[in-house]
């Protein structure tokens, strides 16, 4: 018995390093090893840096200027923390509010803010024509992962693309159909207008419409994480940063087709569930203006390296051609 | 009226200017209310028709279809059914309880209990709805989930849906209906009760045959205000209703063979989608149409409530 436990433990350790197995079918292993087969949180994101970003050197004419940003709640934390250092150096007054990507794009097009933060390309919105003046700056990469509730952590650790499509379109309604316990599947989705939902639909569901049975809708990623954290038989998708948060200790990331949401899998072109975070300006921003200075600042390597990993985000300039090939730019993107 | 009176005075009184300014202030305030109301109806109304003119969704499709997932297929029938069944179920829960509370306080409770109870209901009335929502999410949803899964013998239900939403709404409309019903009962003259007792009726007969019919129109006013609140409640309901695109009821494979699961109300879809919807998109226009539908239903409710109020005798 004791020997068996030791063997199991060493097996567990080996699998924990390996992460998801790349086989499409689930091997018959004991629950202990299966638990370890989940993507570990350490694998999901690069180690958070402890260095602080550099404070930019003041530029002439920017002192006292105000810089307004609105949009995606996913990008806002990054810009908000970058703004602290930016303002310290430049003497500017930067405000970033998160009213959602749609509002951010609307506001920047109307000229009421200088930067609109968005989770999606304007070309992918339902009204691309109304954003024709906007210029895109891709400033970060956010990876998303499917997560399941506690009761599934020992049995469901990988789903194939086909299984995910069947779950989200209502063909599969019980976890027993995909090797889990006899429990009804509760799908936790985001609202129709959500940028994350659009990303999920495009890269995981291949554009299919969701029509699952026991669906819950939550209006923010945080609410999705809470619902899964307290739920039974629940599945949903969140930005990888949420898996690291101690607030949601009972959500378990799972793999898609054997690949977890890790930087390595993204860069190998094996994991497609990620998206760019966009900063949109109306036209090309004036070279000596606050918006241009801020956008230059946030893509500086030291700023990206120190602020992005804390949010679980990846750096745009570190994406490999293989990763970029999985996300071809929409027609008309700049 | 008052201005006419002051006109009739031969000399300009001290303080007449102050009085004029006061009247102006009252008149302007009243005007602001009317203007605001007209503006709201005009603004929401004009926006809402863009669903049909700009986005080319046919009204039949919009009100009768349940397809809420493609760009030009936005049908709200399930949300209308969800909202209406939420109102109905809340009334089924709330009206008997609030009537009983009103009868108890008005007719049965001893004096020393009457006033503490009334104050307690007032306190109840003041609780912000988000707190009921949290309570529903943390207490009611797991309770319903565990109960249903227990009788179904497996993990088949997640507890969200119409039932917890109706429970939460019941908490919110109960004090409204109870206080208004209580006021209506208090307005019934003493002579009526005494007449009834003089004819040899018992207290139970007096309450059911005299008091409640006499206070009926007043009670209905309370019920209609409750309906309006149930229809418009958003935040608390959004916590527990599940917000999915499904009929609130149906058949299922598991005991009790009734689908008791997530559904959606008009208000919660508005809350969830508005922030992210881009201006001019079909979804954006559809959300305005949902707002207008809510405005129209609430206007009808006010009209019905006025009709009942007009019937009031006491």
Image (spheres, coloured by chain):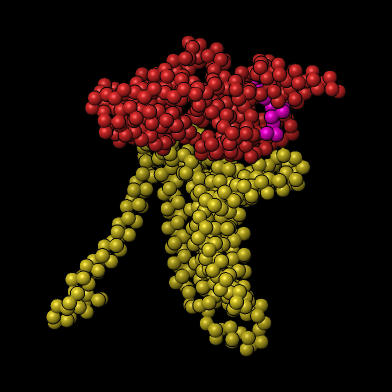
Judged left or right of residue A155, residue A42 is left
Q: Is residue A85 magenta?
A: no
Q: Is residue B195 visible?
A: yes
Residue drawn at the location 64% of the way across and 49% of the way down: B139
Judged left or right of residue A198, residue A68 is left
The chain coloured yellow is B
Q: Nearer the viewer, residue B130 or B73?
A: B130
Residue drawn at the location 57% of the way across and 32% of the way down: A245
Q: Nearer the viewer, residue A74 or A50?
A: A50
| Residue furthest to the left | B11
Quarter of the picture holding the N terminus of chain B = bottom left
Q: Is residue B110 above or below residue A262?
A: below
Name the colour assigned to chain A in the rendering: red
| Residue furthest to the top | A321
Q: Nearer the viewer, residue A101 or A169?
A: A101
Q: Which residues are magenta?
A: A150-162
| Residue furthest to the bottom | B198
Q: Is residue B258 above or below residue B112?
A: above
Q: Is residue B213 visible?
A: no
Q: Position of residue B86 (x, y in %)?
A: 57, 52
Q: Nearer the viewer, residue B241 or B309?
A: B241
Residue A184, by quadrant, is: top right
């Amino acid at each position: 018995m004791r020997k068996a436990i030791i063997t199991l433990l060493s097996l567990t350790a080996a699998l924990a390093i390996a992460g998801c197995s790349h086989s499409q079918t689930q091997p018959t292993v004991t629950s202990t090893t299966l638990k370890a087969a989940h993507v570990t949180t350490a694998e999901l994101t690069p180690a958070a840096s402890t260095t602080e970003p550099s404070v930019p050197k003041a530029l002439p004419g920017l002192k006292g200027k105000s810089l307004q940003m609105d949009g995606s709640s996913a990008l806002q934390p990054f810009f908000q923390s970058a703004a602290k250092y930016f303002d310290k150096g430049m003497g500017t007054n930067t405000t970033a509010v998160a009213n959602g990507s749609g509002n951010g794009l609307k506001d920047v097009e109307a000229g009421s803010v200088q930067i609109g933060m968005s989770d999606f390309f304007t070309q992918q919105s339902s009204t691309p024509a109304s954003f024709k003046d906007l210029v895109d700056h891709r400033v970060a990469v956010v990876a998303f992962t499917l997560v399941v509730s506690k009761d599934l952590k020992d049995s469901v650790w990988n789903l194939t693309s086909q299984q995910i499509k069947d779950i989200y379109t209502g063909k599969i309604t019980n976890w027993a159909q995909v090797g889990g316990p006899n429990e009804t599947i509760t799908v936790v989705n985001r609202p129709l207008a959500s940028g994350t939902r659009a990303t999920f639909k495009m890269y995981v569901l291949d554009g299919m419409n969701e029509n699952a049975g026991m669906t819950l809708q939550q209006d923010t990623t945080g609410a999705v994480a809470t619902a899964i954290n307290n739920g039974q038989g629940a599945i949903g998708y969140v930005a990888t940063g949420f898996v690291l948060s101690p607030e949601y200790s009972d959500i378990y990331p799972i793999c898609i087709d054997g690949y977890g949401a890790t930087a390595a899998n993204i860069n190998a072109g094996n994991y497609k569930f990620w998206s760019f975070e966009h900063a949109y300006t109306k036209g090309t921003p004036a070279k000596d203006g606050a918006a241009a200075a801020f956008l230059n600042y946030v893509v500086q390597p030291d700023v990206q390296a120190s602020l992005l990993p804390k949010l679980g985000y990846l750096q745009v300039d570190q994406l490999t051609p293989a990763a970029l090939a999985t996300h071809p730019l929409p027609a008309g993107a700049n | 009226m008052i201005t006419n009176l002051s006109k009739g005075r031969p000399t300009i009184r001290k303080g007449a200017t102050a009085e004029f300014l006061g009247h102006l202030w009252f008149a302007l305030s009243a005007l602001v209310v009317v203007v605001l109301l007209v503006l709201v109806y005009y603004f929401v109304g004009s926006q809402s028709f863009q669903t049909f003119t700009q986005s080319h969704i046919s009204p039949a499709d919009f009100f009768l279809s349940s397809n809420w997932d493609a760009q030009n297929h936005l049908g709200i029938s399930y949300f209308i059914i969800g909202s209406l069944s939420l109102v109905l179920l809340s009334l089924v829960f709330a009206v008997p309880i609030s009537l009983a509370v009103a009868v108890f306080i008005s007719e049965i409770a001893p004096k020393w209990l009457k006033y503490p109870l009334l104050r307690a209901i007032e306190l109840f009335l003041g609780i912000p709805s988000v707190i009921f929502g949290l309570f529903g999410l943390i207490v009611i949803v797991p309770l319903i989930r565990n109960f249903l899964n227990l009788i179904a013998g497996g993990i088949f239900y997640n507890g969200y849906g119409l039932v917890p939403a109706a429970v939460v709404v019941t908490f919110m409309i109960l004090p409204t209906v109870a206080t208004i019903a209580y006021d209506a009962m208090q307005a019934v003259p003493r002579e009526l009760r005494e007449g009834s007792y003089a004819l040899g009726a018992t207290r139970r007969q007096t309450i059911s045959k005299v008091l409640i019919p006499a206070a009926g129109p007043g009670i209905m006013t309370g019920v209609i205000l409750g309906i309006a609140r149930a229809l418009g409640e958003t935040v608390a309901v959004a916590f527990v209703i599940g917000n999915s695109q499904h009929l609130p009821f149906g058949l299922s494979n598991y005991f009790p063979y009734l689908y008791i699961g997530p559904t959606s109300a008009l208000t919660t879809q508005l809350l969830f989608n508005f922030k992210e919807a881009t201006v001019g998109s079909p979804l954006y226009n559809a959300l305005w149409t949902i707002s207008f539908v809510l405005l129209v239903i609430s206007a009808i409710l006010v009209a019905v409530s006025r009709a009942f109020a007009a019937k009031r005798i006491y």
